Amino acid sequence: MSQIYSARGARQMDAATVAKAHAEAELLRVQTAAAAGKANVEVERVRREAAAQARRERRQEREESAAARRERRRAACARIGGQLDRHRVTLVTIAVIALFVSVALPAQIDFLGSRWAWPMAVAGGVSLESLTWMFAIQGQRREQRGLSAGVHRAGTWSAALVAAGINLAHGAQMWGLGFGVVAAVGSLAAPVAYETYRLSVSEDDTGASPEEIRHNRRRRRHHRKVHRAATRLRWATVPPMDEARAWETAWRMVHAAEPGVTRRELKRHTKRAGKVAQLVTEHADAGPLPSLELFTGPRTDAPAATPQQERTDFEDGAGERTQDRTDGPLNVPYEQVKPRTPEPPKPTRTAPVRPARTAARAASDKAYEEAELERTRQRAEEAYAQSLDAGTPIGPAALGREFGFSEGWARKRIKAVDERRATAARQGLHLVTAAGQQ
């Protein structure tokens, strides 16, 4: 089919093409506008969500900040409360001192103002009150360093007494005796409050319990000599001696006895024991003797016994046997050895002449002889113990000859002393001899 060119048809075709292009362009514009609207809506939604999220974050931050502030405030309040509770005594003391000073200082200023100009009166009153507290604070500082504060304490109370005298005289003259007494008490009560606070602080710094503080205070009050001796011992040693060891050593120095036993108690016990021993000696025939545990030392006013037999141990310790005395009577001279310890006092009293013995009297005489034997054993054991302390122990032969007995008897006494000392060493005891007690 042949194409016939027509200008009109060409124009129509061009118009249709243009209309189609316009329609497509309009459709594209509408689509673009719709897409832009959707995009704007999405952008607005995202913006609103971002703004809401930002508001939520800011609100959360504000809440967290408020919670942190509340926590810090509570911690600060707790810290301040703890500090106030810890320093409650200090704060109360400061308040009491300020109250007393507020009463005493105006009275001093008024007294000085009646004689000087007011600036000089104020300066003089403040200077007098400041002098008191300067001495008090410097004295506490020296005591904390372990130095003597006697001069500062004397200065504190001297200045306080001067201020109290001024307030008493001037207050009584101007406003009556009652006001003068109150003003004087204000000048004295402030240093008293400070001294009580200082004492309480010094006791708290030691770290001791209240019971230990009361115990140490009673001990210092009731045993002043021992306390002074213990203090000198601690001062004399470098490094200072332990307090408990210094007290124990000072007690032995003052009382010559174990801690807890005083010289008066030892004297009273020795006196009573002597009375019991004298009573037993005077009434030896009246009945059975009291327990020998009552005697703390050897008897020197009774005749020495002369037993005829003694028991000696076998060397293997399997049993005992009796044998006759191999040495002579007590008054027969022996070949004397050089004594290593002070010779015990010899008896000077002779046995009384008694009538024919009855059964009861014979039993009493036997008990008396046994008591004398026990005292002789005690003297021998004490002599051997003293020789051990002196570093020159007596042999069994010399000990037996010194007391008029056999060597076997002396070995028994030596063995008894050694066993007693071994037991005391195991138990951690300190042996005090009778000579040391007297």
Image (tube, helix red, strand yellow):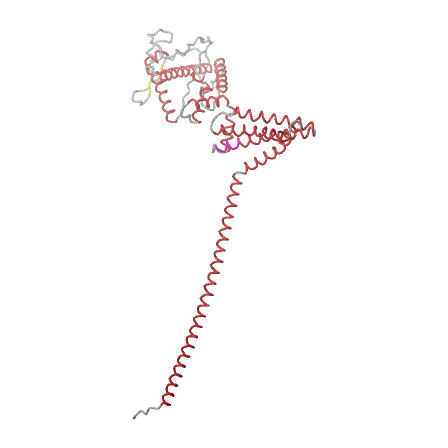
Q: Is residue 62 above or below residue 75?
A: below
Q: Nearer the viewer, residue 131 or 334?
A: 131
Q: Position of residue 156 (x, y in %)?
A: 56, 26
Q: Position of residue 265 (x, y in %)?
A: 49, 20
Q: State the quadrant of the C terminus.
A: top left
Task: Locate residue 8 relative to residue 146 in the image: left or right.
Answer: left
Q: Nearer the viewer, residue 336 or 40?
A: 40
Among the 4 quarters of the image, the one containing residue 103: top right
Q: Position of residue 237 (x, y in %)?
A: 41, 23
Among the 4 quarters of the image, the one containing residue 122: top right
Identify the residue at horizontal 51%, vertical 41% (top origin): 83
Residue furthest front in the image: 7
Identify the residue at horizontal 50%, vertical 44% (top origin): 79
Q: Position of residue 24 (x, y in %)?
A: 39, 80
Among the 4 quarters of the image, the one containing residue 184: top right
Residue 257 belongs to magenta span: no
Residue 199 belongs to magenta span: yes
Q: State the quadrant of the N terminus.
A: bottom left
Residue furthest top in the image: 333
Task: Tell me how many marks there are.
Answer: 0
The range drawn in magenta is 198-205
Residue furthest bottom in the image: 1
Majority secondary structure of magenta residues? helix
